[in-house]
Amino acid sequence: MLNSLTPIEKKVISSISEDKVINLAQKMIQIDSQNPPGNEKELAEFIYDILSDLGLKVKLLDFLPNRPNLVGLYESNVSKKSLLFDGHLDTVPIGNPTLWNVEPLGGVVKEGNLYGRGSVDMKSSISAFICALKTIIDLNITLDGKVIIVLTSDEEISGLGTKKVLEKGYYANAAIVGEPSDLEVNIAHKGVARWKLTVFGKSTHASTPEEGINAIYKMAKVLIKLEELHNTYISSEKRHRILGTPTLNVGIIKGGIKDNIVPDICEITIDRRLIPGEKLNDVEEELKSMLSKISFQDPKFKYELSLYHIHNPAETSPNEYFVKLSKKAVKDITGKESTIEGFVATTEMSHLTEVGIPSIILGCGNIKMAHTINENVPVKQIIDLTKIYALIILRYLGKI
């Protein structure tokens, strides 16, 4: 498919250094940015120096104490058109290092794959974008517009870094979120809302349980209803054309302090995935209605429902020019038609679409490898992604 490229595009693609792309990804993996505890600052400063050397205007913006967001701006012409790359600096913890076949933070290349925590999620994609832009800059190719690189802290927990950057006035006409999509163009993802539900009882000695109220027994009624509710989602006609149905999961349960005490409190967490078009208030009212029915049937059922996390769903129209342009770039490099898909996890893309920025998720690696022992990504995918990013930059911002 490289025959469809223009002479300038061919020049850029042929000039991309595979060794430099992989070497940069390795160096980023070797910088520990596990969250928790959230020590992204060293990596942010490392990338700050790289982007500054490329001629970008770079800022480290306060987000959390010693945990900055990084913004780099490359502007080669006066056009107001702009392309934003969104990524995150943090990774999930490595877990038990003895379970890994390689050093978790070694950035080892083995049998054609790059290993290490963050290789998939998402340091390889960051390296690919930086190296794509570097190649264009090194070749003195003038872009008609600007490139904005946004790399955030605490994505794996709060997911609010991009929101905070946008609140400082940064904006773009289109955006790429570099989460692992196996080189497929993803245009939507589910949102997530999480609640803590506390059920109250009355403690007493386990030998006289009739004198108390067992909060765990009361919670059992809720768990049965929540499972039924989830099953109704799966069989419901409420379905997104790409993302499918909403889902519900109980992830944590806590109750009781001793085996000979009737528990007076039981807590669970409820994780509800939202599809585009769903409203948080409607979802919460559905939960409250279910709990009210239980309370009506059992006057001793006392509870408290508390929302502690919300991240909205996101969607970009498949008819957007930027979506079609990105699909064409994928096909020109891989030879395969990119299918329009949805991302299974929640990302910071929602902050971008909420302010009207047409956005896609496009990165290397499979999301199923993220957060796993022996996390790895094919080296060829990293290189292909670098070429894809280069074409997108050239074609979206134009050449004059």
Image (tube, rainbow, N blue to C red):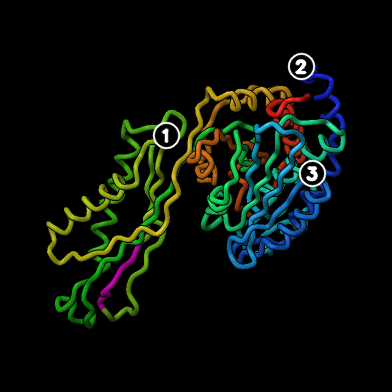
Q: Earlier in the sequence, mark 2 or mark 3?
A: 2
User: Which type of secondary structure does the marked residue at label 2 adopt?
Assistant: helix
Question: Gap between marks 2 and 3, in whole Å?
Answer: 31 Å
Magenta part of the chain: 262-268
- In the rendered image, which residue does mark 3 sit on? 111
Local crowd size for mark 2, using a 10 Å CA cut-off: few (<14), some (14–19), many (≥20): few
> Marks 2 and 3: which is nearer the front?
2
Q: Residue at x 55, y 33 (%)?
A: 358
Residue 332 located left or right of residue 312: right
User: Which type of secondary structure does the marked residue at label 3 adopt?
Assistant: loop
- In the rendered image, which residue does mark 2 sit on? 4
| Amino acid tagged 1 | Gly
208, above or below 74, in the image: below
- In the rendered image, which residue does mark 1 sit on? 244
Local crowd size for mark 1, using a 10 Å CA cut-off: few (<14), some (14–19), many (≥20): some
Q: Residue at x 26, y 47 (%)?
A: 286
Q: Residue at x 57, y 53 (%)?
A: 161
The furthest residue to the top: 4
The picture quadrant where one finds residue 183 is top right
User: Which type of secondary structure does the marked residue at label 1 adopt?
Assistant: loop
Q: Residue at x 65, y 32 (%)?
A: 81
274, above or below 292, in the image: above
How many marks do you count on the picture? Answer: 3
